[in-house]
Image (tube, helix red, strand yellow):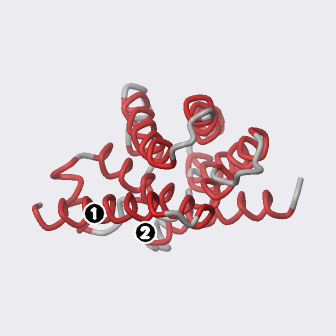
Amino acid sequence: MTKKIWLSTLVSAAFLLAGIHPLELTWLSWFGFLPLFLLFFDPKARLRDILFPSLLTGPLYYGIGLYWLLFYEVRIYLLVLLVLAPTFTIYFLVLWLVTGRVKSEWLKILASSFLWILFHQIYSLTPIGTGAIEVPFYGSLALLQIVSVAGFSVLAGIIVGINASLASLWKKRSVAPGVLLLFFASLLFGIHLWG
């Protein structure tokens, strides 16, 4: 594997872990998906170039973030890790399959946001619940205010949309990702002000 893939994995997991207590760097965790989306929007990327880093990011993030379960029961820790670790891989696999032939950046970015909301809803039906896949996103009171208005799923979808827009803008340097970035940012700010 290339250094870019290993670095993307480590940076993504580190950003996501930065939002968990005691660090409380929630703003940094909002960009945890950016390295993975940079790989996803790379025109030369193959499916394995995104699946491998996302497969490593999940166990790194959940393995370290949920270490406290080891103090209670090792079997529960392993079960939760088994269920949650492939979340990012499944997400990027489905996203790749859905948008693989799509040329429109608008549709790819919107699909990434709506697909994360769908995954969020599916995980909310499991015993693990909704908060398990986005714990680092919900640090400050302002974010909880947004959640009180729009719900956890919408906030998570907006965050993923911001990451996808930033990655696409970085890779393609076209107008569409910039417009969608402004859309997601204004949506987030508008919900915050309204709440």
**CB contact under 8 Å: marks 1 and 2:** yes
Residue 189 appears anywhere in the view: yes
Residue on which disc 2 sits: 26
The residue lying toward the viewer, choosing from 51 and 71, is 51
Residue denoted by label 1 = 143
Q: Element at badge 1?
A: helix
Q: Residue at x 48, y 43 (%)?
A: 112
Q: Is residue 77 visible?
A: no
Mark sitting on residue 57: none
The quadrant in which residue 117 appears is top left
State the residue at coordinates (43%, 69%): 26
* Extreme-right residue of the structure: 1
Asked if residue 4 is positioned above or below residue 119 in the image, the reply reads below
- Secondary structure at numbered mark 2: helix
Seen in the picture, residue 32 relative to 84 is either above or below; the reply is below
Amino acid beneath label 1: Leu
Which numbered disc, 1 or 2, marks the residue that appears first in the sequence? 2
Name the residue located 64 percent from the left edge and 46 percent from the top edge: 58
Residue 34: x and y in percent read 57, 61
Q: Position of residue 123 (x, y in %)?
A: 43, 31
Which x, y percent locates residue 192? 19, 64
Kind of residue sitting beneath label 2 = Thr
Label 2 crowd (10 A; few <14 / some 14-19 / many >=20): many
**Residue lying farthest left?**
194
Q: CA distance from mark 1 to mark 2?
A: 10 Å
Please state the horizontal and vertical placement of residue 124, each as a whole percent of the image. Answer: 37, 32
State the residue in front, 3 or 110.
Answer: 110
Of residues 151 and 140, the one drawn nearer to the viewer in this rendering: 151
Task: Identify the residue shown where x is 32% and y is 43%.
Answer: 153
Instruction: Name the quarter where the C terminus is drawn.
Output: bottom left
In this view of the protein, which residue sits in the foreground, 131 or 93? 93
Q: Is residue 103 above or below residue 139?
A: above
